[in-house]
Image: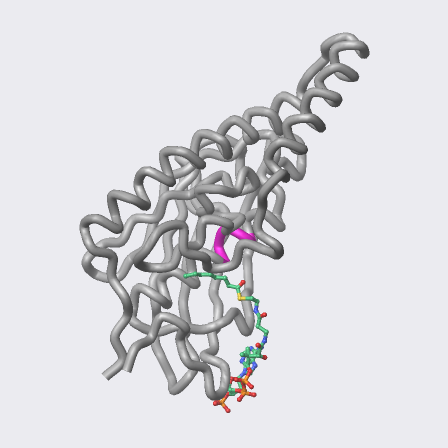
């Protein structure tokens, strides 16, 4: 039977420590992105800030992964998606979402989006809504014990999604062979703004990297 690796208590503690280190770094860069979009300070301050940031990037690049982050081990134990553009603890591009799992398989999150994700004035960019929903729907597939890549993702933008506080949720509808059908949404305080449905497909011959015999 296929089993998936779980963290021990010590491994969880180590991972929490790493999260406590990298989380604030990503949060500081997120604040920087917002500041970069909205600042109206004098030109010389911007030039100075640019030089300072280039210097800081140089410090961080002194020792780094040779390639992309992928699904990587920060510490012993379960591999983590800390580079994810949706939930990644280490990725300042991620809003980030913290996903919650209900006992009935519903995956949901309450989160905030700011100016970095603006499409129409004051509203969430449609592509960003697709990114969030792709991930959350994929997570609902995983939560059901299945796995797969997005084959088709269909969105219906019912009305504009305001920047600010939002909620997303997803649940699996059914599984047919290697295909998992899943549905979800993004909502503001007034109700659903974007509806999504997707088919996630387990690629032919795929073996999960965390699977043990
Ligand atoms: C928990 C973390 C969540 C993270 C979520 C992140 C999600 C992602 O970003 S995934 C990245 C984006 N997606 C991709 O890159 C996928 C690229 N595509 C592929 O790899 C392949 O085309 C893949 C895996 C979808 C299907 O390939 P393959 O396994 O060869 O499928 P194949 O054997 O031809 O077809 C299997 C079944 O699926 C159907 N199918 C194939 N492709 C699609 C598709 N794109 N859409 C719908 N159905 C499809 C076929 O009709 C067939 O159906 P049936 O069994 O009824 O005849």
Q: Residue, x 61% and y 56% (percent of image)?
A: 67
User: Residue 163, relative to residue 13: is it above or below?
Assistant: above
- Taking the spot 49% from the left edge, 39% from the top edge, the residue there is 95
Q: Quadrant of residue 110?
A: top left
Quarter holding the C terminus?
bottom left
Q: Is residue 188 left or right of residue 40?
A: left
Which of the 4 image quarters holds residue 115?
top right
> Measured from the top left, where is residue 157 in percent x and y?
56, 51
Q: Position of residue 138 (x, y in %)?
A: 43, 63
Quadrant of the snapshot with the N terminus:
bottom left
Query: Is residue 108 in view?
Result: yes
Q: Residue at x 19, y 58 (%)?
A: 103
- Residue 126 part of the magenta-drawn span: no
Q: Is residue 145 above or below residue 73?
A: below
Q: Residue at the location (59% across, 55% down)?
A: 68
Camera-nearest residue between 114 and 60: 60
Q: Where in the figure is residue 88, as x and y percent of width and height?
A: 46, 46
Q: Which residues are magenta?
A: 130-134
Rendering colour mode: one colour
Q: Is residue 173 above or below residue 9?
A: below
Is 131 magenta? The answer is yes
Residue 37 visible to an observer of this rendering? no
Please say if 41 is above or below 211.
above
Horizontal arrangement in the rendering, residue 205 relative to residue 48 (left or right): left
- Image coordinates for residue 113, horizontal then vertical, percent: 51, 35
Q: Main secondary structure of the magenta part?
A: helix
């Amino acid at each position: 039977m296929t089993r998936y690796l779980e963290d021990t208590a010590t491994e969880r503690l180590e991972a929490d420590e790493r999260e406590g280190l990298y989380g604030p770094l990503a949060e500081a860069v997120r604040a920087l992105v917002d500041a970069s979009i909205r600042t109206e300070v004098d030109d010389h301050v911007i030039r100075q800030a640019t030089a300072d940031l280039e210097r800081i990037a140089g410090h961080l690049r002194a020792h780094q992964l040779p390639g992309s982050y992928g699904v990587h081990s920060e510490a012993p134990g379960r591999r983590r998606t800390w580079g994810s553009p949706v939930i990644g603890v280490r990725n300042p591009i991620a809003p980030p979402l913290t996903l919650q799992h209900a006992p009935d398989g519903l995956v949901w999150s309450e989160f905030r989006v700011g100016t970095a994700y603006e499409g129409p004035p004051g509203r969430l960019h449609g592509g960003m809504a697709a990114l969030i929903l792709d991930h959350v729907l994929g997570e609902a597939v995983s939560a059901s014990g299945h796995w797969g890549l997005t084959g088709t993702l269909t969105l219906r933008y019912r009305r504009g999604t305001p920047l600010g506080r939002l909620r997303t949720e997803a649940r699996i509808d059914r599984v047919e062979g290697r295909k998992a059908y899943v549905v979800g949404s993004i909502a503001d305080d007034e109700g659903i703004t974007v509806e999504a449905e997707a088919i996630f497909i387990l690629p032919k011959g795929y073996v999960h990297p965390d699977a043990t015999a």
